[in-house]
Amino acid sequence: MKIVIVGIGYVGLANAILFSKNNENEVVLLDIDENKIQSINNHKSPIKDKLIEKFFVQNISKLHATSNIKEAYFNADFAVIATPTDYDEQLNFFDTRSIENVLKDIKNINSKINVIIKSTVPIGYTKTIKQKFNMSNIVFSPEFLREGSALYDSLYPSRIIIGDKSVLGKTIGDLFLKNIEKKNVDIFYMDSDEAESVKLFSNTYLAMRVGFFNEVDSYARKHNLNSADIIKGISADDRIGKYYNNPSFGYGGYCLPKDTKQLLANFYNIPNSLIKAIVETNEIRKKFITQLILEKKPNILGIYRLIMKQNS
């Protein structure tokens, strides 16, 4: 079976290794970045991820990279789209042109390929794009990978979401189940709109937790309270849990800022206050911390760590 992975980022590379571990699969990574292509073909990871780097030390004979679209799509059975969909502040929506460019190439070169979209998209996008390209063989299946542990999360997923209830959806579900390491993982088949909702609402919930505990910390600071003790006491409740509860400047990275804004855009004609507040509280927190620093009137300001999380 030949599987093409379009996009050499965390998502694309993790999925490529996931499928290449099975000797029955031929996996081709397709990208426009020649440096990444050369790195992969020399069995070196182009991104920082301990598990991914470990796999590249081994000889992965079934995995290679190219920028040649005809070579990549020739006789391919599946294409996994993992291209970036940045949030466009002017459009107030995800920029999905990278996905559409891939679909144009697939339709022109090998329209029989079954397409799996892993890139995050607006709610309703998959149905729209299937009609636009007159292609029924497109399925959205969201990823839930963490930066720094992308391959682990691919091998041992918390759940698998397939945005298709047809035979094709079942085929794609079986494809993932056959290649992951985790046993007895929950798999859910649903309409594409619902799968897209799962992705955006999941990330927005995580952003909400970050915002909540940041506001706990803001309150504690203004009243000279120990926020660490308060948060420990709150988080000891099993219904609340001890995750995503560390006060910070706000949620950052690639996914949470853009996904929360996209979900808010999807709510444009629906009454809401919580989703809007999640986006706003992140900006409020950054201003609050900045003001605390400025009030100290420092002569020299040091910045410790510039990335969202360790090993990302």
Image (spheres, rainbow, N blue to C red):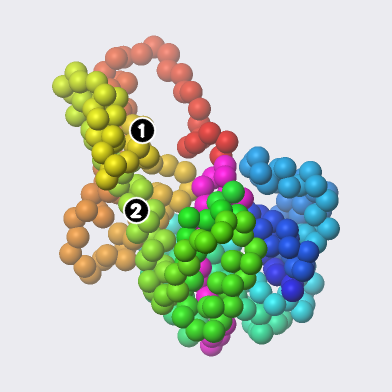
**What residue is at 42 percent from the left and 75 percent from the top?**
190
Q: Is residue 135 visible?
A: yes
Quadrant hosting residue 112: bottom right
Picture quarter with the C terminus: top right
Viewer-side residue, 237 vs 113: 237
Q: Residue furthest bottom?
A: 134
Residue numbers of the magenta segment: 132-151
Which residue carries the number 1 mark?
246
**Residue at the location (53% across, 34% down)?**
310
For the point 65% across and 63% down, which residue is it? 179
Q: Quadrant of residue 214?
A: top left
Q: Quadrant of residue 121?
A: bottom left
Residue 180, horizontal then vertical, whole percent: 61, 60
Residue 295 vertical position relative to residue 15 in the rendered view, above or below: above
Asked if residue 249 lies left or right of residue 103, the reply is left
The numbered disc on residue 168 is: none
Hey, what amino acid is under mark 1? Answer: Asn
**Residue 138 painted magenta:** yes
Judging by the rendered image, the residue that carries numbered circle 2 is 204
Q: Main secondary structure of the magenta part?
A: loop
Looking at the rendered image, the quarter that the N terminus falls into is bottom right
Q: Nearer the viewer, residue 130 or 50?
A: 50
Mark 2 neighbour class, 10 Å CA radius: few under 14, some 14 to 19, many 20 or more:
many
Q: Position of residue 201 (x, y in %)?
A: 35, 59
- Element assignment for label 2: helix
Query: Is residue 227 part of the magenta span, yes or no?
Result: no
Numbered disc 1: secondary structure: loop
Residue at the location (36% across, 13% down)? 298
Report how far apart the C-alphas of labels 1 and 2 lie in the structure.
Answer: 17 Å
Give percent across and percent down for residue 149: 57, 45
